[in-house]
Image (cartoon, rainbow, N blue to C red):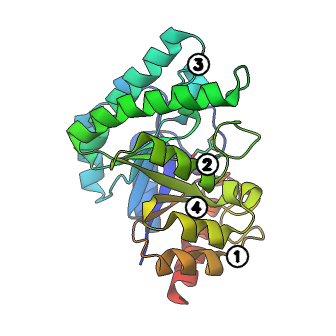
Amino acid sequence: MFKLSMVVSVQEAVFESIALKGRLEDCIKKAHTMGYEGVELSFPNPWKVDIEHLKRILADYDLEVPALSTGLSYLHYKWSLTSLDSSLRTKAVEALGKYIELAELLNALVVIGLIRGESREIPRDKALSMLEQGLKECCRVAESRGVTLVLEPLNRYETRLINRIEEALEMVHRVSSDNLKLLVDTFHMNIEEPIIEDSLRSAGGLIAHVHVADSNRLAPGMGHLNFKSILSVLKDIGYKNYLSAEILPIPDPDTAARATIEYLRRIMASL
Ligand code: LER
Ligand code: MN
């Protein structure tokens, strides 16, 4: 019904909600052994990826890469599509170009999360226009390489720019490219959406990727979200791609990763 993946971090990483971190090979082997079909890769510097080495290890363990996460570029280097510093904006577009190049080789999506910026120092309207321009530029590259970008609504404590699915849909319409779709994250939706199920239905076929974590960002099943209801709506609207776990490594990375796959498999079997 849905394929399962785990977000793994394969370079230095300051983002804490990633259960598996460390040597690429160890993370990939562990995800495979636990039964995951994919690993979503999160890294700050797309120029430092050895793609041939990566593809070899992925093939050895028969794992797909549903998406490349780009938020660490913002957290480590401040590269942002809405920065007032034009050199940081240019760098964000260049980095996204490189992520897109890697994504083409891996058949992956490219996540537009925190790399859009937080918009704390500029009016939101201006930031939205800058974001629209930046996304249009990136979409041209994505279109030429047949890659899809996915815009992720993030909760208000991380950015002022696009917190709800409704706002993300507006931006997708403004940019108007077939290569820009949505990534929805159950943790952020729990904070921002009035009724998660209604918001999912409003996005419908535009949802191309899903991050799962419980209400407290622990493994699904360790908080109070109703995953049975959420997954049954995703099934209803015809979603067939990955549920990618972006969770805190609590009580420890292996327990969290194992609990996620066991719980989600149980829910899927009941739908
Ligand atoms: C990234 O996918 C995400 O959900 C954010 O919370 C990262 O800051
Ligand atoms: Mn997320």
In this rendered view, identify the residue nearer to me: 97 or 265: 97
Q: Which numbered disc covers residue 54?
A: none
Residue 257 is tagged as 4
> Residue 198: image x %, image y %?
64, 71
Q: Nearer the viewer, mark 4 or mark 1?
A: 1
Looking at the picture, does residue 89 appear above or below residue 185?
Answer: above
Q: Quadrant of the N terminus?
A: bottom left
Dot 3 or dot 1: first in sequence order is 3
Q: Earlier in the sequence, mark 2 or mark 4?
A: 2
Q: Nearer the viewer, mark 2 or mark 4?
A: 2
> Which residue is labeled 2 in the image?
167
Q: CA distance from mark 1 to mark 2?
A: 24 Å
Frontmost residue, 243 versus 59 = 243
Label 4 to label 3: alpha-carbon separation: 35 Å
Q: Tag 1, which secondary structure?
A: loop
Crowding at dot 4, Cα within 10 Å, few <14 / some 14-19 / many 20+, comes out as many
Q: Earlier in the sequence, mark 4 or mark 1?
A: 1
Q: Which residue was labeled with disc 1?
A: 226
Question: If you read the primary sequence from the N terminus, does the residue marked by circle 2 or circle 3 appear first?
Answer: 3
Query: Going 72% across and 69% down the picture, which residue do you hit?
Result: 195
Q: CA distance from mark 2 to mark 3?
A: 20 Å
Q: Is residue 204 above or below residue 97?
A: below
